[in-house]
Amino acid sequence: SSFVGYTVGMPQKAAYAASKAGMIGLAKALATEFGARGIRVNALLPGGTDTPMGQADANKPEIVEFVKNIHALKRIALPEEIAKSALYLASDASSFTTGTALLVDGGVSICRT
């Protein structure tokens, strides 16, 4: 999923936000349906990440700076940082985690500066 549509609204992203919010609802519903069978379902909500899609959206230096600055960490994530959280959710370390929306957003959901 994404932080967009969960904690932050972004202009020109209505369809994207709606689809990502729907994924969170789907994860919660599936977690309740399949939890008794030992199947865990969670949603991973990354912040701004240095991917081809992110680079296409932030295609000017001033946009990149804006995106960095909306995060509390004042930077954009590396894909490997998001992957580590996905690995946590896929591992036994998260054996009692289901139906959650895990924010891995560099603090964009809490930042107001």
Image (cartoon, helix red, strand yellow):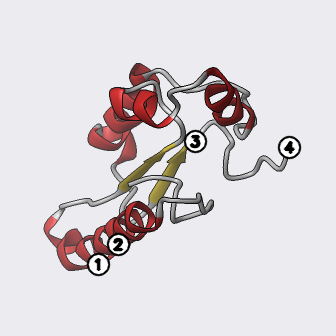
Q: Nearer the viewer, residue 91 or 50?
A: 50
* In contact (CB < 8 Å): disc 4 and disc 2: no
Q: Is residue 80 left or right of residue 11?
A: left
Q: Using the image as rendered, state which of residue 72 and residue 17 is in the foreground.
A: 17
Residue 79 picture quarter: top left
Q: Amino acid at mark 2?
A: Gly
3D distance between C-alphas at marks 2 and 1: 11 Å
Q: Position of residue 15 (x, y in %)?
A: 38, 67
- Give the CA distance from mark 4 to mark 3: 15 Å
Question: Which amino acid lies under the numbered mark 4 shown in the image of this protein?
Answer: Thr
In the image, which disc is placed on residue 22?
A: 2
Find disc 1 in the rendering and name its residue: 29
Residue that mark 4 sits on: 113
Q: Are marks 4 and 3 in contact (CB under 8 Å)?
A: no
On screen, 63 above or below 100?
above
Residue at mark 1 to residue at mark 4: CA–CA distance: 34 Å
Question: Element type at marker 2?
Answer: helix
Which element is circle 3 on? Answer: loop
Whichever of callouts 2 and 1 sits on the residue coming sooner in the sequence is 2
Tell me which numbered mark, 4 or 3, is placed earlier along the sequence: 3
Quadrant occupied by the C terminus: top right
Q: Which label is found at residue 105?
A: 3
Mark 4 against mark 3, which lies toward the viewer?
4
- Disc 3 marks a residue whose amino acid type is Asp
Against 85, residue 9 (above or below) is below
Left or right of residue 101, residue 92 in this image: left
